[in-house]
Amino acid sequence: MKKRIMYVDYLKIFAIFGVVMSHSLTQILQENVHSFKWNVGNIILQTVSPAVGIFFMVSGALILSSERTNSIGYLFKHRLVKVGVPFLIWSAATIAFSYRVDGHITFMIWLKKLLLIYNQFPSPAFWFMYPLIFFYLISPLVKVFVDHASNKVIDYIIWLWLITNLLLPDIAAMLPQQIALYFTNIPNSNLVLMGQTFGYFLLGYRLHKLPFEKNDWSKHFIFSLILLVLIVIINYFNTVYQLNIQIIGYTSLLTLLMTMEVYLTVKNWSHFHDLSDKVNHTATTVAGLCFGIYLSHGIVMQAVEQYLHIGSFWLVFLLTSVICIVLTYIISKIPKVGYYVIGVEN
């Protein structure tokens, strides 16, 4: 049996519940700006903002480190099936549930929405699947590149991506329009494939290959906290003085730096701190359910908010998380069904 990489499991768990939390905060962040509740929600959102980037980085680390990535047959017979089929199933279910909640659904409305999946998200939360699937499709090419390129060349591509897809857009957003136009990229013509997501895959692989350093985890943890405080302060000035500094989300340079620090903190800490077999087994089990939790949490959260009329984002987060864990765990135990519904191999 292939040995688990525990730090990857820990990162997956942080990322999935970070995503669930961020979506639980949607309503509160649209109400009573600068109220105590809004400020608490905003700080929590900033704390979990590395979640999306971590998912991309973990995917890049695992896929580009696997020898199976060289096989196009394995890609189409296994990886795309494991990801694509559950995505289609949950997209169909999410569309049906959303229209049912709205009070009007016919088979033709549902079918048309499903057939538009190529260029319209079935749910806003499912945008993540599009760059992920595209990365899967080009992963054999990227695998050839990383296997034969020096670290210096890989770093060059990462820097090129960072400057053209994160730094320059951030600068353009902060400058007056008459100056910003000189830094704004041409739509659909970024210098690096897949724009603002591709670099995360490559960066995840690059950080995965770094040697473990015993004392590095505490240093990276402190840097993570410093970046979080900086993001909170800048966000405060953003809202008070109507600044336009990009600080939250995977497209933000500051969030990228925080994501890297969280990644390296967990990587180095887990390597030198052995947890009990029971804790590791639980972490591995939950990490294996992360894809299913991601796919199902939209429906579950909508049902919790719609039918239980819960106003507390903490309770919405807790109920959604527990229901999704139980639901996906049960599905994972059903032979064949677990594979095609949530991408878990029995």
Image (cartoon, rainbow, N blue to C red):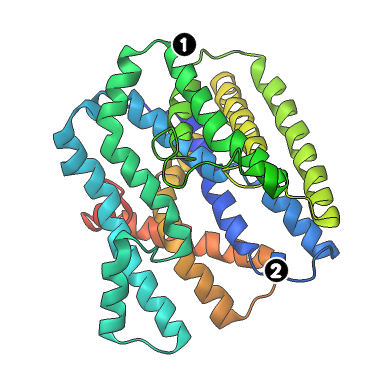
Amino acid type of the residue tagged 2 in the rendering: Gln
Displayed quadrant of residue 250: top right
Q: Nearer the viewer, mark 1 or mark 2?
A: 1
Residue visible at 46% across and 83% down in the picture: 101
Residue 26, position as x, y percentages in the image? 63, 65
* Along the line of sight, the residue nearer the viewer: 164 or 194: 164
Amino acid type of the residue tagged 1 in the rendering: Lys
Residue visible at 25% across and 42% down in the picture: 79
Say what secondary structure mark 1 lies in: helix
> For this view, does 135 lie left or right of residue 203?
left
Residue 29, position as x, y percentages in the image? 71, 64
Does 62 appear above or below 213?
below
Mark 1 lies on residue: 152
The N terminus lies in quadrant: top left
Residue visible at 30% across and 24% down in the picture: 143
Q: Residue furthest front?
A: 178
> For this view, does 28 lie left or right of residue 74?
right
Q: CA distance from mark 1 to mark 2?
A: 44 Å
How many numbered circles does the render carry? Answer: 2
Residue 310, position as x, y percentages in the image? 65, 76
* Along the line of sight, the residue nearer the viewer: 101 or 312: 101
* Along the line of sight, the residue nearer the viewer: 297 or 277: 297
Say what secondary structure mark 2 lies in: helix
Residue visible at 61% across and 67% down in the picture: 316
Residue 106, position as x, y percentages in the image? 30, 87
The answer to whether residue 247 is visible is no
Does 299 appear above or below 59?
below
Pointer 1 or 2: first along the chain: 2
- The image's mark for residue 30 is 2
